[in-house]
């Protein structure tokens, strides 16, 4: 028998006993297990304890984040495509537009397109398809006759409801094996990134100038 494990376990028990002088944990196996769990939760991720492909060759964490976000977007699109297979939807953007209208109510064409982070020409094509299918309707704004307001129709609600089970299941699959706490942490981090990028996207900076402009306006290290 390898007694190294036994020795390590004894050291861990001694540490538990030493740190539990105020009886924060019950002095039994359940208290010991809870202490170990909290010890693990308190470990902060760092370059020392997080491993990624290419790290040993100098690959940066920024490169990993960018790549993983691209991969996750592709995975999500694959599940979304499956969620609408055999339905009346042609693209995932169609049901995403309908979900936004159902969730947030009527909005202008520009607001709807911006909420879906798309260029105006592409967004207009999607809205026109939705109008053609009678899934949404557009009317003149009551405050500005030059502006069109889009709202979901009952037919749009019905066609969306037919696929909602698959759409919800696809969303659950995208979340994968994350715990509830990990989901909330990820939401917080992704919201932070979204709040950074969304205003930049809304400025419609020319592609040739985009990276230089954003780099100059923010404190990035130019390595």
Image: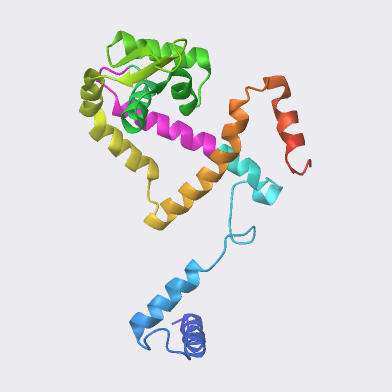
Q: Nearer the viewer, residue 92 or 12?
A: 92
User: Residue drawn 36% across and 86% down?
Assistant: 26
Q: Quadrant of residue 206?
A: top right
Secondary structure that dominates the magenta span = helix
User: Residue drawn 43% across and 52% down?
Assistant: 184
Is 140 inside the magenta-drawn segment? no
Picture layout, residue 179 above or below residue 105: below
Q: Quadrant of the N terminus?
A: bottom left
Would residue 37 be found to the left or right of residue 195 on screen?
left
Q: Quadrant of residue 108?
A: top left
Q: Quadrant of the C terminus?
A: top right
| Percent position of residue 96, x then y | 37, 27
| Percent position of residue 56, x then y | 68, 51
The region drawn magenta spans: 68-89
Would residue 140 be found to the left or right of residue 14 on screen?
left
Is 79 inside the magenta-drawn segment? yes
| Percent position of residue 21, x then y | 48, 91
Picture layout, residue 21 above or below residue 150: below
| Percent position of residue 69, x then y | 53, 38
User: Residue drawn 28% across and 38% down?
Assistant: 169
């Amino acid at each position: 028998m390898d007694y190294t494990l036994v020795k390590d376990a004894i050291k861990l028990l001694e540490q538990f006993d030493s740190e539990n002088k105020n009886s924060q944990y019950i002095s039994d196996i359940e208290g010991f297990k809870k202490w170990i769990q909290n010890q693990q939760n308190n470990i902060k991720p760092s370059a020392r304890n997080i491993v990624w492909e290419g790290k040993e060759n100098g690959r940066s964490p920024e490169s990993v984040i960018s790549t993983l976000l691209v991969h996750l977007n592709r995975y999500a699109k694959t599940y979304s495509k499956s969620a609408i297979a055999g339905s009346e939807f042609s693209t995932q953007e169609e049901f995403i537009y309908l979900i936004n209208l159902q969730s947030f109510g009527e909005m202008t064409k520009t607001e709807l397109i911006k909420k879906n982070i798309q260029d105006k020409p592409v967004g207009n094509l999607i809205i026109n398809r939705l109008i053609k299918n009678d899934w949404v309707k557009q009317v003149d704004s009551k405050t500005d006759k030059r502006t069109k307001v889009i709202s979901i129709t009952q037919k749009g609600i019905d066609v969306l409801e037919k696929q909602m089970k698959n759409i919800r299941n696809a969303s659950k699959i995208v979340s994968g094996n994350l715990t509830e706490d990990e989901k909330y942490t990820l939401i917080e981090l992704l919201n932070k990134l979204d709040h950074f990028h969304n205003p930049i996207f809304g400025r419609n900076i020319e592609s040739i100038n985009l990276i230089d402009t954003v780099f100059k306006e923010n404190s990035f290290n130019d390595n």
